[in-house]
Image: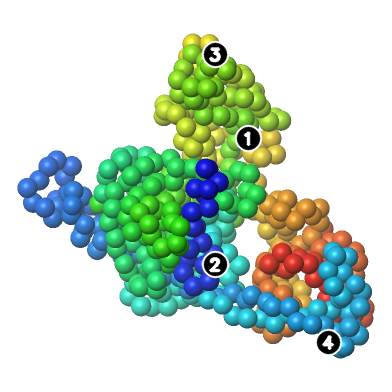
Amino acid sequence: MKNQIKSYVVIALLSSGITLGAFQLFNLGSKNTLGEVPSAFTNTASSVNNVPGSPGEFTYAAEKSTPAVVHIKTKMEQRSRQQSSPFDDLFGGFGDPFGGGGGGRRQTPQQQEASGSGVIISADGYIVTNNHVVAEANEILVILNDKREFKAKVISTDPSSDLAVIQIKASDLPFLTFGDSDALRVGEWVLAVGNPFNLESTVTAGIVSAKGRQNIIDREGDINPLESFIQTDAAVNPGNSGGALVNLKGELIGINTAIYSRTGQFAGYSFAVPVSIVKKVSGDLIKYGNVQRGFLGVSILEVNSKLVDEKDLKVKDGVYVGGFADNSAAKDAGIKVNDVIMKIDGVDTKSTAKLMEIVGRKRPGESLNVSVNRDGQIKEFKVTLKNKDGNTSILKGDIGETYKSEFLGAKFGSLSSADKEKFKLSSGVKVVEVTADGRLEMYGLSKGSIIVKINDKPVNSPKEATELLEARRGRIKLEGIDVDGSRFIYVL
């Protein structure tokens, strides 16, 4: 049943077309003209229905949020294989060690387009959106609410949370301040703002119907997704991806990401990444180039009646500790197998989604106060989180320093750990930029391609790849993986 339900959730369909698919986060120094609630606002009941934040009064939040929500249009190339011509065979003919056909295959670029939404989070042009909106895009166009258009660059992306940060060269932009997604209550009114079906600046209303939803999206092998979605019944459709979910004070409380549907159109439920995660992820992407994730280093299960009986637990809810990873931060702090985590930093952890959400807000080296039930007794532990390598260091972005090859007309970056895992690679470099009319573009290779070997030599770093290319003599043989996952060999 679980797999059946997941098959109905259509994340990519929130981006239209072909479905491409800080918190003052880092104190940008810009005055927040959108985030201040007028002095007339009060939390007490009012007979005046247009008081900002009043139940059923949507105009204030709509007027405040729409200027900060942008329309994102992307272009990408999808290549179709052609038969190798005699000319190709003459300069190819090496065969394909990956098990494909002959060498020297050409590809015909076919331009495709998609669209989605984004939210301006700073006056100087930082925009948060979904990763699947901008993934593999060759060109990103941002259209503001006032109809101005800008080309955008990708700052960095995080597939695990399906978030990305892009930037446009502009100043004094309207932007949304972050609200408090923890304070959201089921039944509370919210607005979804975005660009469904290319209909710009569309606002819909609904209520929060659930919190902490997980196992919503099939992420193609991602073993560590960060999911704790806000579920609403606000109408969200293709093109809403990356748009804003706001409360009635016009504060950002989520990024619309997925819908539950059998048809690809809205069928009653939509899901948003809570701003508690958006704030942390976007801040890290801008500051570090990747997300600095702290890990407890535990294997966990949600407590249910069956587990209570099997393990003779003294509690009916919480998160059960079933084991530890190497260099586990939790184990080092004194937590044991069969402990049940009840609270983290004073917040109840009745689900694994809530636990992962709280831990996901922290960086390596930061500490958490963890309350566990051990054989009916409550014990407190201070846990200093570690990174994925088992220490407390801040990790550099996956791409790291880039090197440019003038010969190929491309920039190279390091492979991410996700790329290595996905394609079972121990070496290679990633194409992070392609120059117009350069040799790589002529052969149909684009940003996101991976070069594994140059002249049959495995390449281990962007610097090494560039040096091999610049020191070339005669023809160059490239072997690698295209953005669609297919293997290639080219001889230039």
Q: CA distance from mark 1 to mark 3?
A: 31 Å
In the picture of the structure, the residue carrying the numbered disc 4 is: 85
Please name which of the two marks, 1 or 3, marks the residue nearer to the observer. Answer: 3
Q: Which quadrant of the view contains residue 121?
A: bottom left
Secondary structure under badge 1? loop
| Residue type at tag 3 | Asp
Q: CA distance from mark 2 to mark 1?
A: 34 Å
Please name which of the two marks, 2 or 1, marks the residue nearer to the observer. Answer: 2
The reply, left or right, for residue 246 in relation to residue 312 is left
Task: For the residues labelled 2 and 1, say whether their Cβ atoms are less than 8 Å apart.
Answer: no
Viewer-proximal residue, 404 or 61?
61
In the picture of the structure, the residue carrying the numbered disc 3 is: 312
Residue at point 11%, 53% (across, down): 49
In the picture of the structure, the residue carrying the numbered disc 1 is: 386
Residue at point 71%, 30% (across, down): 326
Residue 372: give x, y in percent of width and height.
Answer: 51, 19
Residue at point 36%, 42% (across, down): 210
Task: For the residues labelled 2 and 3, say whether their Cβ atoms are less than 8 Å apart.
Answer: no
